[in-house]
Amino acid sequence: MKKLILIISLTFIFLGCSSKEYKLENPNRLKDVGYRVGNQYDVVVGDVEFSNPELASSEKMFEKSLKTIFQNELRNNDFRVLSREELLQVMREHAFSTTLSNGAINPHFSVSDYTMALKITNIGLDDSGILIPIIFNSLEHSIEISVELSMIDNRTGTIYGSSGSGRVSFRTWNALILMGDLNVSYSVPLENALKLAIRDAIIKLRI
């Protein structure tokens, strides 16, 4: 028994204290999808929705607001995101500024070109590898997210749509619940998979 414990201990030492690795499922995935390059458009963003109530429960696994992730990814792809959440305060400020300027209309308040909406249609989680409860586990985790992106031309009412997907995998290991990747959070790979899916859908819009 002592010999077995010694072998297990030496194995853990050689493995190292932590081997968590975040990576794309396909190393060239990010390069293949790339970023949107083209004209800069002004957009407003609606709430991010889920295709069914069961998926909605996964929102708590993200550390960031889904709408914030969506907005940031639009900015990364050369869209100008206009705020509408505080529109009442903006209108009050606009009325105050126009009063000071003798009623002149503020030329800096932009009308958006498009309204963007995002729906998450699938979140797939998969774990595989070696699992010996309490004693040891070495697992490969993969996360795949699928989305549907809708874009409405605010001047013509034309609706454009596309779908996208993103996949991220990472590895974790734990020994005797005392060392390794303790309390690993799924939030980072989830966010990366969502970003890839959004970017994939944006590129497919071809605007």
Image (cartoon, rainbow, N blue to C red):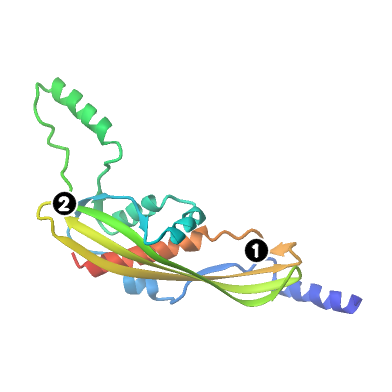
Image: 123 above or below 92: below
Q: Which residue is mark 2?
A: 113
Residue lying furthest front in this view?
Answer: 53
Number of residues whose C-alpha sits closer than 10 Å to that of mark 1, classed few (under 14), some (14–19) or many (20 or more): some
For the residue labelled by badge 1, is the local secondary structure a helix, a strand or a loop?
loop
Residue at x 19% of width, y 63% of height: 160
Q: Are marks 1 and 2 in contact (CB under 8 Å)?
A: no
Image quadrant assignment for residue 196: bottom left
User: As drawn, is 55 to the left or to the right of 3?
Assistant: left
Residue 154 x %, y %: 14, 51
Residue at x 38% of width, y 50% of height: 68
**Quick check: can you spot residue 102?**
yes
Q: Which residue is mark 1?
A: 181
Task: Give the distance between the C-alpha atoms of the residues marked 1 and 2, in whole angstroms.
Answer: 46 Å
For the residue labelled by badge 2, is the local secondary structure a helix, a strand or a loop?
loop
Residue 85 x %, y %: 30, 40
Image quadrant assignment for residue 104: top left
Residue 183 x %, y %: 64, 58
**Quick check: can you spot residue 35?**
no
Residue at x 38% of width, y 54% of height: 69
User: As drawn, is 157 to the left or to the right of 179?
Assistant: left
Viewer-side residue, 34 vs 67: 67
Residue 207 x %, y %: 18, 64
Three-letter amino acid code at the position of disc 1: Asp
User: As drawn, is 38 to the left or to the right of 104?
Assistant: right
Three-letter amino acid code at the position of disc 2: Asp
Viewer-side residue, 126 vs 109: 126
